[in-house]
Amino acid sequence: MSMNTNAVPQAGSGIPVHDTHSKTIGYLLWIFGFTGAHRFYYGKPLTGTIWFFTLGLLGIGWIIDLFLIPAMDREADQRFSGGAINYSVAWLLLTFLGFFGVHRMYMGKWVSGIIYLCTGGLFLIGVLYDFWTLNTQISERNHASGLRS
């Protein structure tokens, strides 16, 4: 069994928590936080959508999130499975190249990646779906690959 070097102990529990999400990426996405990007990244699609349509709750929620990112990062680290697929890489690929399906190809989903490439991310509906579900998709892939090794 291989040991994940990204495992860090959870305060007070002795149970290792994998550092699946990056605070640096979270803060970079926060710059565009009025679109909800950082909230989607940390696995909060409902509030990410609200931030998107309200411009970060008229900027007030956006400013408050500056202080909430460390807690969102810890929660995401506890919620999602670490492994071969890096969350930060996949999210950057989705954010900037999702239209072309590069994030799906990175995760080994070649058929859907090529379909995204030929259809503009399934006419952007697939990209929207992936903003809502990417963390779960990665977590399931990482968990499944961990069971096989």
Image: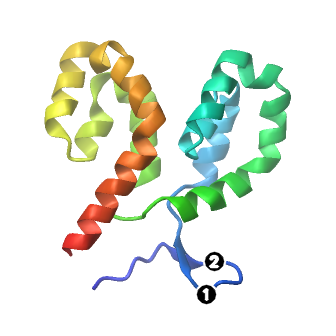
Residue under label 1: 14
Q: Can residue 47 be seen? A: yes
Left or right: where 6 falls relative to 51: left
CB under 8 Å between discs 1 and 2: yes
Q: Quadrant of the C terminus?
A: bottom left
Identity of the residue drawn at 53% across and 66% down: 19
Quadrant into which the N terminus falls: bottom left
Give percent across and percent down for residue 15.
56, 82
User: Which residue: 50% across, 60% down?
Assistant: 20
Per the image, label 2 sits on a secondary structure element best described as loop
Towards the viewer: 55 or 95: 55
Q: Quadrant of residue 124?
A: top left
Q: Residue furthest left?
A: 111
Q: Is residue 107 left or right of residue 65?
A: left
Give me the C-alpha separation between circle 1 and circle 2.
6 Å
Residue 18 versus residue 139: which sits nearer the camera?
A: 139
Relative side of 133 to 33, left or right? left
Q: Amino acid type of disc 2? A: Gln
Q: Is residue 62 left or right of residue 9?
A: right
Could you say where residue 24 lies in the image, as x and y percent from the top left? 62, 51
List x then y, in percent, for residue 17: 54, 73
Q: Secondary structure at mark 1?
A: loop
Residue of label 2: 10
Q: Quadrant of residue 86?
A: bottom left
Local crowd at mark 1 within 10 Å, few (<14), some, or many (≥20)? few
Q: In this view of the protein, can residue 35 be seen by the observer?
A: no
Crowd band around label 2 with a 10 angstrom C-alpha radius: few (<14), some (14–19), many (20+): some
Q: Residue at x 36, y 51 (%)?
A: 138
- Residue farthest to the front, as pictured: 46
Identify the residue shown where x is 40% and y is 77%: 4
